[in-house]
Amino acid sequence: MQYHRLLPAIFILFMGHFAHATEVLRIGVLYWSMNIPGQVAMRQGLEAEAERLNARAKAAGLPMLELIPQVAGDGPGGSNARSARCRTW
């Protein structure tokens, strides 16, 4: 059995016990770069999964997910940008 396929359902059920349906669960997501195709694909996949989970959560009256994406930046200034962005969450 592929247990990783059950994780979204388990997450929604688990969060239903701790949050009201009107609440939004804000999740900070840090990407290294939007110049790397794999990073772009990862972001697209994660956002598509969040949309799918939100549709299920809405139908069940559970809290919605809000992804807060930030690009950490690649290059010499990337480390400082990451630190500053993480502190603002």
Image: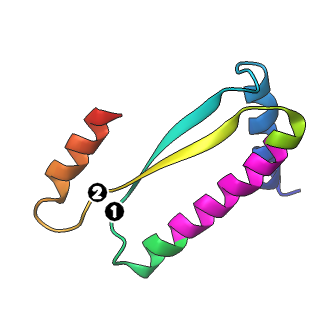
Q: Could you say which quadrant of the image residue 52 lies in?
A: bottom right
Which residue lies under the disc numbered 2?
A: 72
Q: Considering only vertical position in the picture, is 61 above or below 70? A: above
Give the magenta range. Answer: 42-57
Total numbered labels: 2
Position of residue 10 measured from the top left corner of the image (x, y, whole percent): 80, 38
Quadrant including the C terminus: top left
Q: Name the magenta segment's main secondary structure.
A: helix
Membership of 74 in magenta stretch: no
What residue do we see at 25% from left, 63% from top?
A: 73
Q: Considering only vertical position in the picture, is 6 above or below 15? A: below
Q: Secondary structure at mark 1?
A: loop
Q: Which label belongs to residue 32? A: 1
Horizontal arrangement in the rendering, residue 82 relative to residue 65 (left or right): left
* Residue contact at pointers 2 and 1, CB within 8 angstroms: yes
Mark 2: few, some, or many residues within 10 Å (few <14, many ≥20)? many
Position of residue 65 measured from the top left corner of the image (x, y, whole percent): 64, 41
Q: Could you say which quadrant of the image residue 21 lies in?
A: top right
What residue do we see at 69% from left, 58% from top?
A: 49
Membership of 46 in magenta stretch: yes
